[in-house]
Image (cartoon, rainbow, N blue to C red):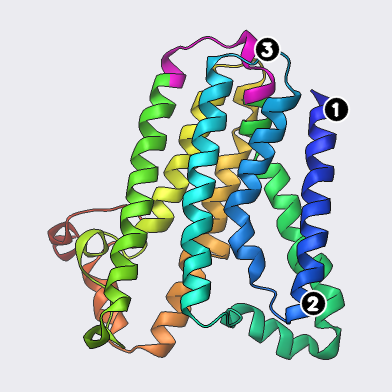
Amino acid sequence: MSQILIINLAVIAISLFTLWCVSIRIRDASIIDIFWGPGFGIVALTTFILTEAPGPSGLLLTAFACLWSIRLGTHLAGRWLSHGQKEDPRYIAMRKKAGPAFGRRSLITVYGLQGGLMWLVSMPLQIGISQSAGASFGFFTALGCVIFTLGFVIEALADAQLRDFKATPTNKGKIMSLGLWSWSRHPNYFGNACLWWGLFFIAADAPYGVFTVASPAIMTFLLLRVSGVSLLERRMARAKPEYVEYQQSVNAFVPLPPSWKRHK
């Protein structure tokens, strides 16, 4: 198992170094966001290929990871293309702050950091797949399948609803508060957190799989406190004063009926 972990770390490092070289060439660090999903698919496939006689849960984890990685990767690539291949505002701000040194620094502060997180967060995939020969298709696997499916559907539907909303010219400058976005201000992030907990529960039926609980916990923390909800909340509140009203009527993360928020 340790060999698989080391090989996956090397695969991630080589992939992200190559991507970093491309980002220097085109002056756009945000292309790493497109790779975030597919990177996990590559880790899952690498682990599956290197595992001798993987069990059914290993195949399930690989299939789920690849399905999600393809969907998220194509979604983010489409968004990047629709925005005219412009760099994300987060990286523009980092580039302005660092000045000419940003290109070199981004190898560590952007690509190295996300590479380390990718390797750590993917532990349920690496251990769950590599140890799947000794895994039983038990309660946790069934529970994980349900949670992953729920999270996958919520994330995909939320992304599609937001994309269609933004594609309508009359909605320019407006706040998305329809569909799932009337139940949660960040339903896509909630779905993403769910699917990672689902992958963990599937891995938990494999030997040592239960010890990967830190991975979905870290992902949930990042979504809530670092790069997801909190970051976007601050940005939206500054850009759109009417967002405060939206905050008061719709729950931040877990989807709940709007009436619950109003009566709280």
**Could you say which disc has been placed on residue 3 in the image?**
1
Residue 205 in the image: x percent, y percent? Answer: 54, 17
Quarter of the figure that contains the C terminus: bottom left
- Whether residue 204 is visible, yes or no, is no
| Residue 249 as seen in the image, left or right of residue 138 | left
**Could you say which disc has been placed on residue 24 in the image?**
2
- How far apart marks 2 and 3 lie (CA) works out to 41 Å
Report which quarter residue 243 is drawn in. bottom left
| Residue type of the residue flagged with mark 3 | Ala
Of 17 and 226, nearer the camera is 17
Mark 2, secondary structure of its residue = helix
Q: Is residue 222 above or below residue 249?
A: above
Answer yes or no: do the residues labelled 2 and 3 have beta carbons within 8 Å? no
**Could you say which disc has been placed on residue 125 in the image?**
none
Q: Earlier in the sequence, mark 2 or mark 1?
A: 1
Mark 1, secondary structure of its residue = helix
Residue at point 38%, 43% (across, down): 151
| Residue 187 as seen in the image, left or right of residue 202 | left
Report which quarter residue 169 is drawn in. bottom left
| Residue type of the residue flagged with mark 2 | Ile
Of 188 and 254, nearer the camera is 188
Residue 10 in the image: x percent, y percent? Answer: 84, 44
Q: Earlier in the sequence, mark 3 or mark 1?
A: 1
Closer to the camera: disc 3 or disc 1? 3
| Residue 68 as seen in the image, left or right of residue 185 | right
- Does the magenta stretch mainly form a helix, a strand or a loop? helix
Residue bearing the label numbered 3: 53
| Residue type of the residue flagged with mark 1 | Gln
Residue 162 in the image: x percent, y percent? Answer: 32, 68
Q: Which residues are magenta?
A: 129-141
- Whether residue 66 is visible, yes or no, is yes
